[in-house]
Image (cartoon, rainbow, N blue to C red):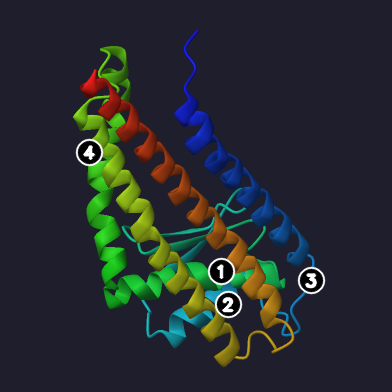
Amino acid sequence: MFFDRYYLILVLPAVVFAMWAQYQVNGTFNKYSKVRAGRNVTGAQAAEAVLRAGGVYDVGIERISGSLTDHYDPRDKVIRLSDSVYDNPSIAALGVAAHEAGHAVQHAEEYFPLRLRRAIIPITQIGSSLAMPLLIIGLILSSMNLVYLGFSTLFQAVTLPVEFDASRRAVAALSEGGLLSLEELPAAKKTLRAAALTYVAALAVSLAQLLRLLIVFGGRRDD
């Protein structure tokens, strides 16, 4: 029976960290989604305010089903807010909505890390489509897989400044626009930090997988 000690040592701890990070973001969002903001502004209204403050007038805001399915679509230039954010006047909803609006402002300003991430996406998509055929023909430890995983790791690394900057923009807009009071801002920051932790965890998992593959592949070449 094959025992992969490198998976146990490298990848498994990163996966556990990722699971914990997801638990944290769900718990934090659920907690502050029950705390109503004093201004009684909804997530959609907060996103609109952030867009206007950033000088962006050509981005729409739509409702999408689900929870924490919020995202900005640069192709259609639309912010899609989940049921738990769109018309929710909670502190958590305002934080999430402002964060997604921050991505739209990044797009309008041609924020370089965001442009770099968009450039990497096609490469990672091609590699993902080839993963199963490579596995079937027994080339899962090939150099092609190393290159694909390397680009995937780079994508995760570039994602961090994009997400951190969007959160920074969100907090600034919520504060300067008076959408949240000084007493309410810490709760919004906690929500955004918890969400950012999931991206840190994704990078940790990707790095661990890449390191494991490098070690295993290097060992087989030495044999």
Local SS, label 2:
helix
Local SS, label 1:
helix
Q: Residues within 10 Å of mark 1 (few under 14, many from 20)?
A: many
Q: Residues within 10 Å of mark 3 (few under 14, many from 20)?
A: some
* Nearest-to-viewer mark from 4 and 3: 4
Q: Mark 3 or mark 2, which has the lower sequence index?
A: 3
Task: Tell me the distance, in whole angstroms, between the alpha carbons under discs 1 and 3.
Answer: 15 Å
The disc labelled 1 sits on which kind of residue?
Ala
Cβ–Cβ under 8 Å for marks 2 and 1: yes
Q: Mark 2 or mark 1, which has the lower sequence index?
A: 2
The disc labelled 2 sits on which kind of residue?
Ala
The disc labelled 3 sits on which kind of residue?
Val
Residue at the spot x=54%, y=35% of the render?
Answer: 12
Q: Is residue 61 above or below residue 38?
A: above
The disc labelled 4 sits on which kind of residue?
Val
Which of the 4 image quadrants contains residue 52? bottom left
Task: Tell me the distance, in whole angstroms, between the alpha carbons under discs 4 and 3.
Answer: 46 Å
Which residue carries the number 1 mark? 97
Cβ–Cβ under 8 Å for marks 4 and 3: no
* Nearest-to-viewer mark from 4 and 2: 4
Which residue carries the number 3 mark? 35
Q: Residues within 10 Å of mark 2 (few under 14, many from 20)?
A: many
Which residue carries the number 2 mark? 46
Residue at the spot x=49%, y=55% of the render?
Answer: 199
- Label number found at residue 37: none
Q: Looking at the rendering, in which quadrant would you find the C terminus?
A: top left
* Residue 173 as seen in the image, left or right of residue 127: right
* Residue 107 as seen in the image, left or right of residue 192: left
- Label number found at residue 147: 4
Residue toward you, 28 or 79: 28
Q: Mark 1 or mark 3, which has the lower sequence index?
A: 3
The image shows residue 120 at horizontal and vertical percentages of 25, 51
